[in-house]
């Protein structure tokens, strides 16, 4: 099965079947159109791997190469996040928000406050920290039959 993938100058989105990680890597300015493209691709990706949730370790949104945030990006994140969460259940999918600067961390933290299900999201500063978060998340939320 061919999974959706985005590879452009300002955005890469893909699912790594070997690691079970979904990646969204942003570069340059964070704009409303970039956010809309991200959410549309994530919806397509999630619908295709929904039946394989055991293979899904987590999602990493990498903001380390983001240089600035468009003034409309926050309202766009709120709208698109609400829209996607109404269509699909992401409550069991942890998300690491990877930042590299104080500005990135501040903007991502503000966004976390206005989007639903912040309990499954964590700001991290390295890929290793993201993997540790996923390990902890799955240990705490393991389903017992």
Image: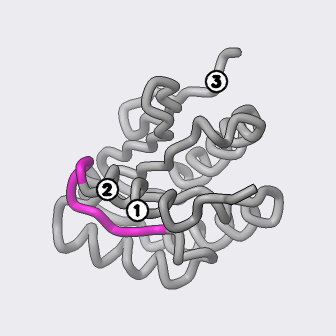
Between discs 3 and 2, the one toward the N terminus: 3
Q: Is residue 35 left or right of residue 107?
A: right
The segment highlighted magenta reads 121-128
Q: CA distance from mark 3 to mark 1?
A: 27 Å
In the image, 36 versus 53, the foreground residue is 53
Residue lying at 50% horizontally and 73% vertically, measured from the top left: 74
The C terminus is located in which quarter? bottom right
Instruction: Please give the label number shown on residue 136.
Output: 1
Instruction: Please give the label number shown on residue 3.
Output: 3
In the image, 70 versus 98, the foreground residue is 98
Total count of labels = 3
Residue 81 sits in quarter: bottom right
Whether tag 3 and tag 1 are in contact, CB under 8 A, the answer is no
Q: Secondary structure at mark 2?
A: helix
Q: Are there few (<14), some (14-19), or many (20+) residues within 10 Å of tag 2?
A: few
Is 127 a magenta residue?
yes
Instruction: Please give the label number shown on residue 132.
Output: 2
């Amino acid at each position: 099965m061919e999974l959706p993938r985005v590879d452009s100058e300002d955005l890469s989105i893909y699912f790594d079947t070997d690691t079970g990680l979904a990646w969204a890597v942003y570069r340059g300015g964070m704009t409303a159109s970039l956010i809309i493209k991200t959410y549309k691709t994530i919806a397509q990706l999630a619908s295709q791997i929904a039946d394989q949730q055991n293979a899904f370790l987590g999602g990493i949104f990498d903001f380390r190469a983001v240089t600035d945030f468009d003034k409309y990006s926050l309202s766009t994140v709120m709208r698109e996040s609400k829209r996607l969460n109404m269509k699909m259940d992401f409550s069991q999918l942890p998300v690491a928000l990877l930042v590299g600067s104080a500005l990135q961390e501040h903007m991502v933290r503000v966004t976390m406050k206005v989007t639903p299900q912040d309990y499954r999201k964590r700001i991290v500063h390295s890929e290793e920290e993201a993997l540790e978060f996923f390990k902890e998340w799955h240990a705490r939320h393991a389903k017992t039959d």
